[in-house]
Image (cartoon, rainbow, N blue to C red):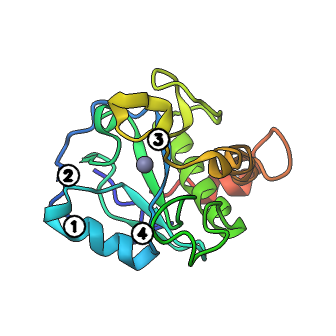
Amino acid sequence: MALWTDLASWRGPTANRVPGGMVEIRGLVVHIADGTYEGTISHQRDPSTENSSHFIVSREGDIAQMVDTADKAWTQKAGNGHWLSVECSGFSVGSEHHASHPGWERLTSKQIVAIGRIFAKVHQVCGVPLALTADPSGMGLGHHSMGGPAWGHDKCPGPPIIAQKPDILAAAEQIISPSGPTPAPDLVVRRAAP
Ligand SMILES: [Zn+2]
């Protein structure tokens, strides 16, 4: 059971989850919310939506945690029990509100850093490799549509955000190892606290 309050604001609970339901943690799956930050938080707190994610990231880089990392969130169907999830405030091309939010089909630089912080902690706490993956049987930083029909959404998060995954990985690597392959000792000590 873990709330990652060192990097996220707790905005749960939501009824949309399975307590203790994570079977394993293979990595972090990136989603586009097709919503604003507060709108997505409200959506996930509404039991009638039957939707949730572990984290939500705003365009400004704020991080909300909605579901404990030990609990199964409801955002990528067959992948739910195996991957942590992050919904990113944005609107995909062709979605209802995209026209009024130009550019929101891709992540802001602050979102990239924020997702990088989450992924760095997934690496540190869960032993997930700092790597990209597009394989639901793989490990690392994934994205929703890699799961195909079993994961329920073939257009999430869309090509612009998929193309930004290397930037998220680079941000996570910078956090883990800011000056090269050997982690700075002070960083290791500081991050030893829960
Ligand atoms: Zn998705």
Q: Marks 2 and 4, Cα distance to the nearest angstrom?
A: 16 Å
Q: In the drawing, what numbered circle is on residue 176?
A: none
Q: Marks 2 and 1, Cα distance to the nearest angstrom?
A: 9 Å
- Circle 4 sits in a helix, a strand or a loop, which is it? strand
CB of mark 2 within 8 Å of CB of mark 1?
Answer: yes
| 78 on left or right of 65 | left
The 10 Å Cα crowd at callout 4, few under 14, some 14 to 19, many 20 or more, is: many
CB of mark 4 within 8 Å of CB of mark 3?
Answer: no
Q: Position of residue 90 (x, y in %)?
A: 53, 66
Q: Marks 2 and 3, Cα distance to the nearest angstrom?
A: 18 Å
**Front residue of this view, candidates 109 and 95:** 95
CB of mark 3 within 8 Å of CB of mark 1?
Answer: no
The tag earlier along the polypeptide, 2 or 3, is: 2
Amino acid carrying mark 3 in the image: His
Q: In the drawing, what numbered circle is on residue 17?
A: 2
Name the residue rendered at 85%, 50% in the picture.
179
Name the residue rendered at 19%, 69% in the picture.
46
- Circle 2 sits in a helix, a strand or a loop, which is it? strand
The 10 Å Cα crowd at callout 3, few under 14, some 14 to 19, many 20 or more, is: many
Ligand 1 lies under 8 Å from the Cβ of mark 3: yes
CB of mark 2 within 8 Å of CB of mark 3?
Answer: no
Q: Position of residue 100 (x, y in %)?
A: 56, 78
Q: In the drawing, what numbered circle is on residue 64?
A: 4
Name the residue rendered at 27%, 30% in the picture.
23
The residue beneath circle 1 is: 13
- Circle 3 sits in a helix, a strand or a loop, which is it? helix
- Circle 1 sits in a helix, a strand or a loop, which is it? loop
Q: Position of residue 141 (x, y in %)?
A: 57, 39
The residue beneath circle 3 is: 144
Q: Residue furthest top?
A: 137
| 126 on left or right of 40 | right
Q: Marks 4 and 1, Cα distance to the nearest angstrom?
A: 11 Å
